[in-house]
Amino acid sequence: ATSQRFFLLRHGEPEYNAQNIIQGGGIDSDLNGVGRSQALAFHAAYGRHAFEAYYCSSLRRTRQTLAPFEAAGAQIFEHSGLNE
């Protein structure tokens, strides 16, 4: 039997997180500069991994976290059931 792994990634940092403001799913904020750097760092570490699928919530910050994978040709599937 082949083993499968599941990677769960939290979105990069939005500005509200940097200010210790809890936002939940009701605030659809963008990543800040740190968050964009975190997204790029994750892609640098795992961009060559052959993931079978990429899913994110419908919040912008989650889609932005996967943007480097999408730019490299990955198809990203949004699912609102993953929202906070």
Image: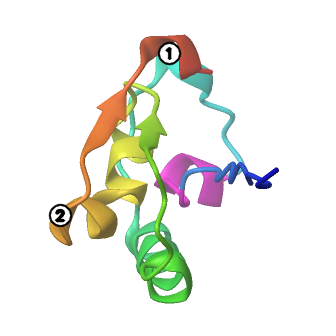
x then y, percent, for residue 30? 35, 48
Element marked by disc 1: helix
Circle 2: residue type: Gly
- What residue is rendered at 46% in x and 50% in y? 52
Q: Which mark is residue 76?
A: none
Q: Quadrant of the C terminus?
A: top right
**Image: 5 above or below 50:** above
**Residue 28 image-quadrant placement:** top left
Circle 1: residue type: Gly
On screen, residue 10 versus residue 52, left or right, reads right
x then y, percent, for residue 20? 72, 49
- What residue is rendered at 45% in x and 37% in y? 55
On screen, residue 80 versus residue 5, left or right, reads left
x then y, percent, for residue 80? 44, 14
Residue that badge 2 annotates = 73
Asked whether residue 44 is in view, the answer is yes
On screen, residue 4 versus residue 52, left or right, reads right
Cα–Cα span, label 2 and label 1: 30 Å
x then y, percent, for residue 25? 54, 20
Asked whether residue 83 is in view, the answer is no
On screen, residue 80 versus residue 20, left or right, reads left
* The one of 33 and 73 positioned closer to us in this rendering: 73
* The one of 28 and 42 positioned closer to us in this rendering: 42
Q: Is residue 14 magenta?
A: yes
Q: What colour scheme was applied to this rendering of the protein?
A: rainbow
The reply to whether discs 2 and 1 touch (Cβ–Cβ < 8 Å) is no
> For mark 1, does the 10 Å Cα neighbourhood hold few (<14), some (14 to 19), or many (20 or more) residues?
few
Closer to the eye: label 2 or 1: 2
- Label 2 or label 1, whichever comes before in sequence order: 1
**Image: 72 above or below 24:** below
The part of the chain drawn in magenta is 12-19
Q: Which mark is residue 26?
A: 1
